[in-house]
Image (spheres, helix red, strand yellow):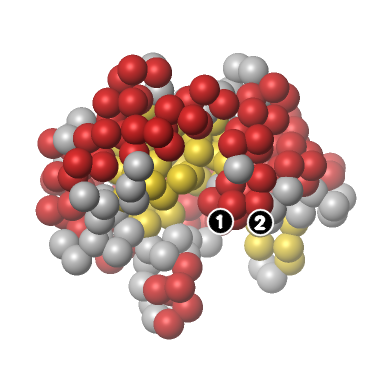
């Protein structure tokens, strides 16, 4: 598949999230993610606000679902999400429930293998249970204790093990993220706020500069087709 650029809105309120998304959309971002901090802060109202502001863009709700799979997916679908995230370490029944809801409400499912003891086996299990995408994810706290950890630890093996599209997130620099299509992970994520060379880019910073940074990132990703 052709590279897709997704912005993860890891902010905590709707106002900042919409402001960041507006800049990202102008810069050519393809998908918008309601990040976990945003969902914790604003819930499904954040998804509804993003859907209202961006009626034609795919919206990922990073729920990290562990239980109650059908209801969580249904709620986000009705709020306007087109994709939801279920954890690979959840019970297989939960994964199947999320997938069933996704089929019932015409959305798609991303399976996150973070914290799985065997990343390849988890990815294969998620594919067998009909998720649409695999997320190779190295967690924030995990990287906090061991900064050397990254999606590269498992990415190649997972890409070779599954036939569905792969996304890699967690601990990647902006430059590394832009190279992900070359590594078999065409669904590329850039987090917001962005940190580049120790400078933090937030909605409150110079919007023209932020837009230029994102435009450059999108161009680099698309050139790695």
Q: Look at the image and tell me whether residue 20 can be seen.
A: no
Q: Where's residue 214, x and y in %?
A: 67, 43
Identify which residue is drawn at 48% across, 52% down: 177
Residue 30 figure quarter? top right
Could you tell me if the residues under marks 1 and 2 are in contact, i.e. CB atoms within 8 Å? yes
Q: Is residue 147 above or below residue 90?
A: below
Dot label at residue 194: 2
| Mark 2 element type | strand
Which of disc 2 and disc 1 is earlier in sequence? 1
Circle 1 SS class: helix
* Identity of the residue furthest to the bottom in this view: 145
Q: Residue at x 41, y 65 (%)?
A: 139
Instruction: Report the side of 93 relative to 190 (left or right).
Output: left
To which quarter of the image does residue 174 belong? bottom right
Left or right of residue 51, residue 174 in this image: left
State the residue position of label 1: 174
């Amino acid at each position: 598949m052709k590279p897709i650029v997704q912005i993860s809105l890891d902010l905590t309120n709707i106002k900042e999230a919409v402001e960041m998304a507006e800049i990202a959309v102008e810069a050519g971002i393809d998908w918008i993610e309601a990040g976990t901090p945003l969902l914790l802060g604003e819930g499904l109202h954040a998804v509804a606000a993003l859907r209202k502001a961006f009626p034609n863009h795919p919206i990922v709700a990073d729920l990290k679902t562990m239980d109650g799979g059908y209801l969580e997916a249904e709620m986000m679908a009705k709020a306007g999400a087109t994709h939801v995230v279920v954890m690979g370490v959840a019970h297989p029944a939960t994964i199947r429930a999320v997938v069933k809801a996704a089929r019932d409400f015409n959305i798609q499912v991303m399976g996150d293998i973070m914290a799985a003891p065997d990343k390849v086996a988890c990815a294969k299990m998620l594919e067998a249970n009909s998720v649409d995408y695999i997320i190779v994810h190295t967690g924030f706290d995990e990287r906090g204790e061991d900064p050397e950890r990254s999606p590269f630890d498992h990415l190649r093996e997972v890409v070779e093990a599954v036939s569905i599209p792969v996304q890699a997130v967690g601990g990647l620099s902006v430059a590394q993220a832009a190279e992900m299509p070359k590594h078999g992970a065409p669904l590329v994520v850039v987090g917001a706020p962005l940190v580049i060379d120790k400078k933090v880019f937030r909605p409150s910073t110079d919007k023209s500069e932020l837009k230029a940074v994102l435009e450059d990132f999108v161009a680099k990703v698309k050139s790695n087709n």
